[in-house]
Image (cartoon, coloured by chain):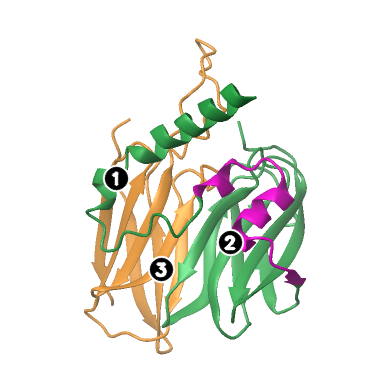
Chain colours: A green, B orange
Amino acid sequence: MQRRVFLKTSLLAAEYGLLTGAVLLLPRNVLGEWRTEVFHATVLDEAIKWVTGGQVVTRTEKIRLRVPAIVEDGRSVQVSIHSMLPGSDSISIFSERNPNPALGTFRLEPGLDPVIDTRIKMGGSGNVIALVHADGRFYSAKQYAKVTSGGCG
Amino acid sequence: MAIDKTHKIRAKMQQGRVVVKLLIRHPMETGNRKQPLTGGKIPRHFIREIHCRHNDRTVLTGFWSSGMASNPYLSFHLQSGKKGDSIRCDWVDNLGLTDAIETRIS
């Protein structure tokens, strides 16, 4: 167990450590504000917890999440998220049936509409979850999609 | 793998807002796929951080996993801006390769 933890940690370090040089070139070094462990979680609830830090997540109708009802190719699925919650400053996307359910987080600065359109991979039929941080609290919406051909390789 | 340079970006005024659409060429390998011939795994290779700026102000930061689709697409809306303003996105992948694309609002 000890050894496994060590290996996992060193792999993580290798993957993210390489970046130090490159990140210095970016306008703002944001490493440290974001826990990269979230992407290694293998269970949805665990992945969400890495983002929320265990805070309560409220289900809401005020996030419009659009995913095709039937996905023919899970390798590229159009997802559209529109938050109508005032003070929305981050949007995260999860897919329940992926080997690693956390797909990405977007941090929105003031002056940006809480609207994100992107494409994700889906490993199988299941819920896509949008998690929005607004006014210091977390809110979520989910949408089921039937995937006829999974895209997680 | 060398990164193909055919990234695309468009920033357009639409009813007072700026709609930005971005298409990046990147394999976004999950590390789970197998090489069809050798059966060996294709190593993980994905964009893990992206920063988008309006003129010099960061407006959007994305932290991604390999679960984003290959050749990632992203669209977002700025509440204000004017023609000629710069929109620039910089990204870095898990191998430390960086790239960027810039356009002017039209």
Question: Tag 3, which chain?
Answer: B
Q: In the figure, B1 relative to B75: above or below?
A: above
Q: How many marks?
A: 3
Q: Amino acid at mark 3?
A: Leu
Q: In the figure, B38 relative to A137: above or below?
A: above
Question: What is the chief secondary structure element of the magenta stretch?
Answer: helix
Question: Tag 2, which chain?
Answer: A
Q: Amino acid at mark 1?
A: Thr
Q: In the figure, A54 relative to A39: above or below?
A: below
Q: Amino acid at mark 2?
A: Ser
Q: Quadrant of the N terminus of chain B?
A: top left
> To which residue does mark 2 refer?
A92
- If you read the primary sequence from the N terminus, does the residue marked by circle 1 or circle 2 appear first? 1
Q: Is residue A67 magenta?
A: no
**Residue segment shown in magenta:** A36-58
Question: Tag 1, which chain?
Answer: A
Please tell me whether mark 1 sits on a helix, a strand or a loop: helix
> To which residue does mark 1 refer?
A20
Select label 1 or label 2 by which is in front. 1
**Residue nearest the viewer, comparing B84 with B60:** B60
Select label 3 or label 1 by which is in front. 1
